Structure formats: C-alpha cells, structure tokens
Image: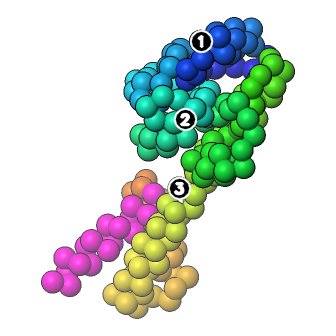
Amino acid sequence: MEKSLRIMIAEDEFLVLMGLKSNIEQLGHQVIGEATDGESAVELAIEKKPDLILMDINMPNIDGLEAIKKINEKLFTPSIIVSGYYDEDFIRRATEEGVFYYLIKPIDIKDLKIAINISISRFKEFQKLQHDLKDTKKALEARKYIERAKGILMDRKKLKEPEAMKFLQKLSRNQNKKLVVVAKEIIQADSIFSE
C-alpha cells in the first residue's frame, strides 16, 4: 500500500463530509482537518499543511477555487475539487488554479482512490520539474561565472581558453572548492585589482 497521506476536507454538506472522511480513512489515510467554509479552509490548510486537499467548489464565504488559489499563494498543495455537477467553466478555472483532479458527487471509494493516486503522482511530477528547473538555472548561473573567470585568466595570464579552464580546475582541486566558488573568487579579486 502507498504511504498514508494527511488529508484536509473542505465540504459544507455534513453528510458528504462524513462520507468523504469515512472513505479516506478506509483507504488508509488520515483526515487532519475539516472545514465547512472557504475562509476557514484557507486558514486550516496554512496551519495544518496537509499532503492533499479535498475541496467542494460551492463553499460559503469564498468558493472552493478561490480558497485553493489563496492556499497555493502561501504553500502549493495538491488539491482535488468536488462538485455536484459537471461544469466546463469550473473545470477551466480549476485547471488554472492548479487543481489536480475534479470529482463529481456522489463519490464512491474507487473514484476517490483513483483521484488521490493521480493527484499525488501529478504533484510529484510537478515537484520534480520544479527541482530540475532550479538545477538548470543554477548550472547556467555557474557557467556564466566560470566563463567570466576564464576570460579574466586568459586576459591576465595570457592563457588560451583550454589552459584557463585547466588552471581553474587545478585551483578548484587544490583548494578543495567547487569550480564556481573559485570562479567567483577570481572575479572578485579581479574587480579589486581593477579599481
């Protein structure tokens, strides 16, 4: 069985809320919070930091999609929207707000299990993409510093590009520092000598 999740439910119909809670617990997950209106759903999600949110679209105070938008501005959490009917406009809005799944009442336990599994899987893919994007940005930034440091070495030491790179690598090894750290130090030193 997959890992037990900490799930928050936001539903204003008591019987539906109890049914969802029962199904979630039967699936081996934990209900860590229940909200019956949009505003308290936002506060509860920010306080409890659930692994997943099940949110009814029609909520008092602020609707479910607006609540998800406010939650995602503070902490991005996978969410499943629950609605009493199929509505293209709601689905479009839900997608724009980063909702991972859309369920129509009545919800049986099999549909709920599929929705939870797909939502968590999509969320993990999303997190991986975010991580890969950060790594790519870091690599590009490091590349810029290394290129600039090589340029300084080529200029000051009259080295060719491959020799400058070897010099940087040797400094990196000898000082037991990352190449980008050595490159930044060379750039900093050069700016001091250039003044």
Please give the name of the residue rendered at 39% of the width and 69% of the height, measured from the top-left corner. Answer: 183
Magenta highlight on residue 165? no
Q: Give the residues drawn in magenta, as a range.
A: 178-195
Tell me if 183 is positioned left or right of 130 in this view.
Answer: left
As drawn, which residue projects farthest toward the right?
110
How far apart are the alpha carbons under marks 1 and 2?
16 Å
| Residue plotted at (75% across, 31% down) | 104
Can you identify the residue that label 2 sits on?
A: 64
Q: How is the image coloured?
A: rainbow
The residue tagged 1 is 14
Neighbour tally class for label 1: few under 14, some 14-19, many 20 plus, Cα within 10 Å? few
Q: Is residue 17 visible?
A: yes
* Above or below, comparing residue 123 to residue 95 in the picture: above
The Cα–Cα distance between marks 2 and 3, rounded to whole angstroms, is 31 Å
Where residue 123 sits: x, y (%)? 65, 40
Q: Amino acid at mark 2?
A: Gly
Image quadrant occupied by the N terminus: top right
Which amino acid, by three-letter code, is at mark 1? Phe
Residue 145: which disc?
A: none
- The spot of residue 42 in percent (x, y) is 44, 30
Question: From the viewer's perspective, is residue 18 above or below residue 169?
Answer: above
Q: As shown in the figure, which amino acid type bears the numbered disc 3?
A: Lys
Residue 135 picture location, percent across and down: 55, 56
The residue indicated by pointer 3 is: 134
Q: Which numbered disc, 2 or 3, marks the residue closer to the eye?
A: 2
Q: Earlier in the sequence, mark 1 or mark 3?
A: 1
Secondary structure at numbered mark 3: helix
